Image (cartoon, grey):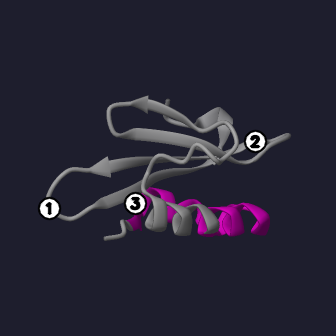
Amino acid sequence: MGWKVTIAPKARKGLGKLPGIVRDALVMLQRDIEEGGPVRGNWPNYGKLGRGRHHCHLKKGRPTYVAVWEEVAGQVRLVEVTYVGTHEKAPY
């Protein structure tokens, strides 16, 4: 059984402002999480932020773009991307 990935409304709001390469990387990350689960050690600077919270870099350099996602407990295996944007404003 795969994972279902959703984008939080707050994260979705800023997607239009992101460069295309970052949006493409987010789509690839979303597919990876759906197939392999929320632990993504194969992504740059992946790290656990605490219980059920993860992050990784979508684009290195200046500015650096990151994604933060959470595992949502329950019967459905759900992951919600809660932030996509620059490293400076990331919620961690």
User: Which residue appears at 14% of the width and 61% of the height?
Assistant: 75
Please state the total of marks drawn on the protein image.
3
Q: Crowdedness of circle 1 by 10 Å Cα count: few (<14), some, many (20+)?
A: few
User: Which residue appears at 76% of the width and 69% of the height?
Assistant: 20
User: Which residue appears at 85% of the width and 40% of the height?
Assistant: 61
Tell which circle, 3 or 1, labels the residue nearer the N-terminal end.
Answer: 3
Q: Separation of disc 3 and disc 1 at Cα?
A: 19 Å
| Image mark for residue 75 | 1
Is most of the magenta stretch helix, strand or loop? helix
Across and down, in percent, residue 69 comes to 44, 48
Residue closest to the eye, 76 or 15: 76
Q: Crowdedness of circle 2 by 10 Å Cα count: few (<14), some, many (20+)?
A: some
Residue closest to the eye, 23 or 37: 37
Disc 3: which residue: 8
Residue 54 vertical placement versus 73 (above, below) = above
What residue span does the magenta drawing correspond to? 5-27
Q: Are marks 1 and 2 in contact (CB under 8 Å)?
A: no
Residue closest to the eye, 34 or 7: 34
Q: Is 7 in the magenta?
A: yes
Q: Quadrant of the N terminus?
A: bottom left
Disc 2: which residue: 64
**As shown in the figure, which amino acid type bears the numbered disc 1?**
Gln
Can you tell which of label 3 and label 1 is closer to the viewer?
1
Can you tell which of label 1 and label 2 is closer to the viewer?
1
| Image mark for residue 57 | none
Helix or strand or loop: what does disc 2 sit on?
Answer: loop
User: Which residue appears at 36% of the width and 57% of the height?
Assistant: 79
Helix or strand or loop: what does disc 1 sit on?
Answer: loop
Tell which circle, 2 or 3, labels the residue nearer the N-terminal end.
Answer: 3
**As shown in the figure, which amino acid type bears the numbered disc 3?**
Ala
